[in-house]
Amino acid sequence: MPTFAAITEEIRLATAALGEFGAGLINPTVRLGVTGLSGAGKTVFITALVHQLLHGGRLPVFEALTSGRIARARLEPQPDDAVPRFDYEAHLHALTTERRWPESTSRTSELRLVIDYQSARRARNRTLTLDIVDYPGEWLLDLPLLTTRYAQWSADTLRLSRTGPRAMLAAPWHRYLAALDAAAPEDEQSAREAARLFTDYLRACRDDRFAMRLLPPGRFLMPGDLSGSPALTFAPLEVSGDQAPAGSLWAMMERRYEAYKDAVVRPFYREHFARLDRQIVLVDALAAFNAGPDAVKDLEAALAAILASFRTGRATLVSTLFRPRIDRILFAATKADHLHHANHDRLERFLARMTERAVGEAKFSGAEVDVIALAAVRATREATVARGRESLPAIIGTPFEGQTVGRDVFDGGTEVASFPGDLPEDPAALLARDGFKGLTAQANDTDFRFLRFRPPLAEPGTSGAPTLPHIRLDRALQFLIGDRLA
């Protein structure tokens, strides 16, 4: 049975939805959520999407633009005054002038883009307002906490921390935990030390060597202005016997866990997540390939948890008025430019396999779901390179300074040719393999992690603005908003 808090939350959401519906009758608006786990490329995706629309980039699959029906796109002040603006201009400068990737998303931000277009159905001029909401994917993993008690969360988190490479990474935390008595009187220093070691464990899991992604609570790795607050100073405890008495360390941790939900999770759900119409989830599958099967399986679990958090379904008058739903979700495997184009379809099939169960449930509810491989900004180009008597497909790009392959150290200004291996035809092979060597190799057959390439040299386009080459960004736009520009 729904709790009083849940019923109250639904009433508040319905009231807000009714107000936004009234405003939408005059000014049609789509709220597009852009998320992904750390390093997936959210900031780059939004910057590229906005830049292409503002300057009429080359987007052949995006019908409204290629048919000439979009008259112009412009930026306007965002509607939520208490939410930071997505700094499009600074991120574009980083990409095109400094040739570096922008800083990762660590907080929620918004940007409003207004598109003037001609309707294909009624041949009249119309306007669509696109409100882009950028938020860390780690925060989605917190949403299940709203319906999970502290005891259950503790048990689940501890059970997971004792599996695979997590057990090694959690060892210092586990040793400290073994000496704690949950029924002992509450103690601030014990709570702080347990929270510190728990956070160290989460941070170690996220390291590129392990690339674990199922790491709630999300704010422990992105504390922001809550750093050091009691709401972020708790950790799982061992469950032993009956619930610990009032005034105990257990009761202290439980109270702070509930404070975290009240101070962090519920406001995020109410003010941002529950108001979304469309959603794209960016996935860095290559990082999981680098780290091995455990990372791949962990990513699969994280994606299932993310999609389970979405309130999906076909958009109807009733749902728009009283219970907003996300009616389109796009899963996008990013950094497709690190593979030859012959492998892009295989990368899509891999992501589709990882999300198939959750995607099936979303489709059953009436939502439309798609999976693509893309590069919002393409950092490489393809070429054929002679290797002995063979001609091999290669990608060419400029690695960041300081990266090494064997004895070679890159200077950040020299292009290199990389020979991507082939992903297997059957995605199940990646889930079962003992390692993922050979996906990228130099001519001397040295295995190494995927290189990090610098953004491409930006050349001026027909509008005078710098061009940003991409892979399938137009297909993403067509799926996400193409129907709203018909």
Image (tube, helix red, strand yellow):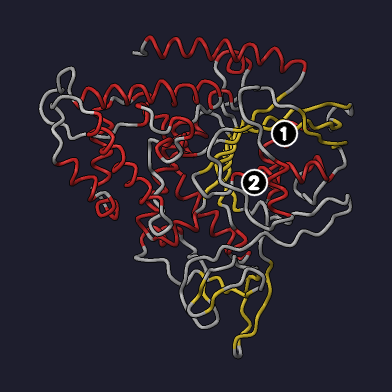
The image quadrant where one finds the N terminus is top left
Q: Amino acid at mark 1?
A: Asp
Residue drawn where x is 24% and y is 45% of the image: 173
Residue 453's place in the image compared with 48, above or below, is: below
Q: CA distance from mark 2 to mark 1?
A: 20 Å
Amino acid type at circle 2 is: Phe
Residue 463 relative to residue 384: left or right: right
Q: Residue at x 29, y 51 (%)?
A: 166
- Residue 162: where, in percent of width, then height? 23, 48
Quarter occupied by residue 63: top right
Between disc 2 and disc 1, the foreground one is 2
Q: Earlier in the sequence, mark 2 or mark 1?
A: 2
Q: Secondary structure at mark 1?
A: helix
How dense is the environment of label 1, judged by Cα within 10 Å: few (below 14), some, or many (20 and up)? few
Q: Relative to the observer, which residue lies in front, 389 or 179?
A: 179
Position of 27 compared to 321: left or right?
right
User: Compared to 108, does 288 lie above or below?
Assistant: below
Numbered mark located on residue 45 in the image: 2
